[in-house]
Amino acid sequence: MLQHLPIENILFIDIETVPAYATYGEIPDNFRKLWDHKAEFLKKLPEDTPESIYSRAGIYAEFGRIICISAGFFRKKEFRIKSFYGDDEFIVLKEFCQLLTSYFNSEDKLLCAHNGKEFDFPFLARRILINELPLPFVLDLAGKKPWEIRHLDTMELWKFGDYKHYTSLELLAAVFGIPTPKDDIKGADIHRVYWQEHDLERIRIYCQKDVLTIARLFLKYQQQPTMGDERVVIVE
């Protein structure tokens, strides 16, 4: 499976997002009205309100923002991980786009994420446009035929054409005997860790663990040997 793809041509990524504002009360009036409307379709319990479910706003590009992007790639015997993170989304995205345009800007390069086609890739593209940055080639889908889109999704690949519900990265890691990336925090904790604790380093480490797990999972899909920690290099 996937043995024909040169793994050196793949950039493995993961993003961490939060609501654009720390609390519901801080949302500007015009956006609060729009969130209230959106929240009506997101309620799961009778007692849910736009304010009580505001922490979910981070998964929508119109109401959230990116605070961390981790990217990993194979170079010879190493797997190198670089993170772009901070409070200024414009700078985070600009630096990540520079990586894409410098090293992953040709038709033989690919992006890979877990649930990337439903979340990471479109979220990135939308936030790049909102921040008025040029859209990198590998994220620009306009006019491309399906087979020209250079995106891989480890969750979609696991379906083998089936239409089962979401399969988490944590579950697939357990199935394949890969160390869990969720040994500290999980995605649901990012809102608290950022807005209440402002611990960007903790979020960066969590995001990098996800990228490493995605790469190890992809190696399993290719039926290649497991990658040990000694091959992992964190690029500052």
Image: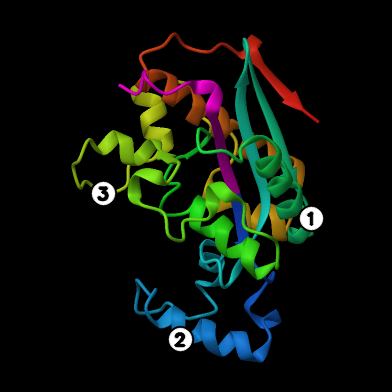
Q: Residues within 10 Å of mark 2 (few under 14, many from 20)?
A: few
At x 41% / y 54%, what residue is drawn?
A: 144
Residue 81: give x, y in percent of width and height: 67, 29
**Dividing the image into 4 quarters, which one contains the N terminus?**
top left
Quarter-of-image position of residue 71: top right
Amino acid type at image mark 2 = His
Distance of mark 2 from mark 1, alpha carbons?
31 Å
Q: Position of residue 35 (x, y in %)?
A: 53, 81
Q: Provide residue 60's location: percent of width, then percent of height.
A: 51, 66
Q: Residue beneath label 1, please? A: 91
Q: Quadrant of residue 212?
A: top right
Q: Nearer the viewer, mark 2 or mark 1?
A: 1
At mark 3, the secondary structure is loop
Q: Circle 2 is placed at which residue position? A: 37
Q: Is residue 183 found left or right of 48 in the rendered image?
A: right
The boundaries of the magenta stretch are 1-15
The residue at the point 65 percent across, 70 percent down is: 130
Kind of residue at badge 1: Ile
Which residue corresponds to mark 3?
165
> Is residue 6 highlighted in magenta?
yes
Task: Establish if 45 lies above or below 81.
Answer: below
Query: Foreground: 180 or 93?
Result: 93
The reply to whether residue 156 is visible in this rendering is yes
